[in-house]
Image (spheres, rainbow, N blue to C red):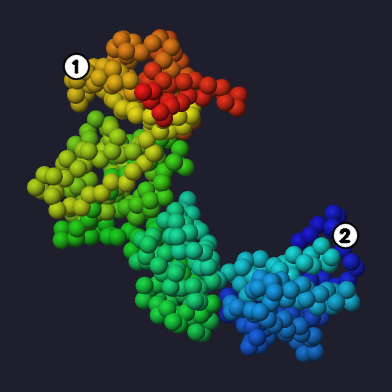
Amino acid sequence: MANAATSPRSAGGKLWGIGLGPGDPELVTVKAARIIAEADVVAFHSARHGRSISRAVAAPYMREGQLEEHLVYPVTTETVDHPGGYQGAIDEFYVAAAERLAAHLAAGRSVALLAAGDPLFYSSYMHMHKRLCERFDAEVIPGVTSISAASAALGVPLVERDEVLTVLPGTLPVAELTRRLRETDSAAILKLGRTFPAVRQALSDSGRLAEASYVERASTDRQRVIAAADVDESEVPYFSIALVPSPSNNAAAQHVSSDEVAGASEVTGHVTVVGLGPGDDAWTTAEVREELARATDIVGYTTYVNRVPERAGQHRHASDNKVESERAAMALDLAKRGARVVVVSSGDPGVFAMAAAVIEMAAEPQWSEVPVRVLPGMTAANAVASRVGAPLGHDYAMISLSDRLKPWDVVAKRISAVAAADMAIAVYNPASKSRTWQVGAMKELLLEHRTPQTPVIVGRDVAGPEESVRIVPLGELEPSEIDMRTLLIVGSSLTTVVESGGERKVFTPRRYPA
């Protein structure tokens, strides 16, 4: 409602935006019913056929002798010969309709403008409100939305705890609908009708079709609820909605129940190894989020499992960071018994992480029939590099300094080989509580091929709460300041530090001199 202190209005009647709810007259609020009965004028929209659903819902609350303003759309979805096209015709109609209502308001009459659902939620009322609220007193009475009515008809919660509900118009392009469906926990898709084929395609492309339900004319005596996959595309009215309910309460999303996992060995599950990205949840891809939401079981190192939002009915199996093979075996065994398992890694699962362990273990005969796939994530190297520019702009290598799974002499040979090849190096696992000397040994090897001025990026806890990123010369790199939460990027002979926008930036040129 416009602020009277800052938006002077004409003296006159009051405009009421009346939310009628989704169709059942008994879902009209007490206040809405009272205002409808008291108003001097009841206004409502309809298509050119003249039948107004809003007028029919409000009829039990109207009184004899009320003035009525029937606002008939000149066009709905068809093409028009208006010089401004469809939008030009609609805009012209809104201007004319607003002036019809303004005439009543200026004469001191109160006007109740009816709106199906809620007046400010995909409603015709809002177009009148924007044109009149600064000229006249206006008040909105909220109504039950079609989403609430459809959810009630379905009888399944839409969202629970920290799940996210996304409201989408079916008029969006298929690719955009698909993207948004992949990124959300739960969705409500409105404005169906002739858009339904595209909506169903987006549900299918996003992998959500099996989870989706279709609700038609919710709350009315013509209400219909069926699976979205079973809808006849030729018979979808505008007043219908597609719902993808809460993953916590959606049997299709959960894939199999815990009882099936425990007792149905004939059910074949699968394992998906995912990368959560380096620290910040914003760097977890939509594809990974979708897989996490549908998993029956989450398996991983405790620190990474704790990054995954908890969901009702989902089982979590956290373990120490030094039991990769055992963790992979557990995940495959759960999947063999029917579970939909997600194994979580930080960064990218294929970079010094769990993908290799799971694939290696899956080759054993006892698990050879279990499907395994890998979903990528942003690497720690790319995350650290992004903070300072483009130090990995040319050829580079990734080397882990950990000698837990390979002997140090192999690590040393690889450091020397890459340094001699004049490549930038992303150095993973540089140190830990039990490994404190490798950074110093690496520095000595590098200085055999690099100058002491070679830039080194020291990135610690990037995208985490304790993030710090420094650029230091190789000759001044202090091994005692490096720990397991640090990633190093050592430049090549061409890597350059520059000033840009008041900050130091680093880049390795894309062209190598002849």
With respect to residue 470, does 119 lie above or below? below
Q: Secondary structure at mark 1?
A: helix
With respect to residue 349, does 457 lie above or below? above
Q: Residue at x 9, y 47 (%)?
A: 365
Q: Secondary structure at mark 2?
A: loop
Q: Earlier in the sequence, mark 2 or mark 1?
A: 2
Residue located farthest toward the front when viewing the structure as drawn:
514
With respect to residue 133, does 317 lie above or below? above
Q: Quadrant of residue 119?
A: bottom right
Q: Is residue 62 left or right of residue 172?
A: right
Question: Amino acid type of disc 2?
Answer: Pro
Circles 2 and 1, Cβ within 8 Å, touching? The answer is: no
Question: Amino acid type of disc 1?
Answer: Asp
- The Cα atoms of the two marked residues, 2 and 1, are separated by 81 Å
Q: Which mark is residue 409?
A: 1
Q: Residue at x 16, y 41 (%)?
A: 361
Q: Which mark is residue 8?
A: 2
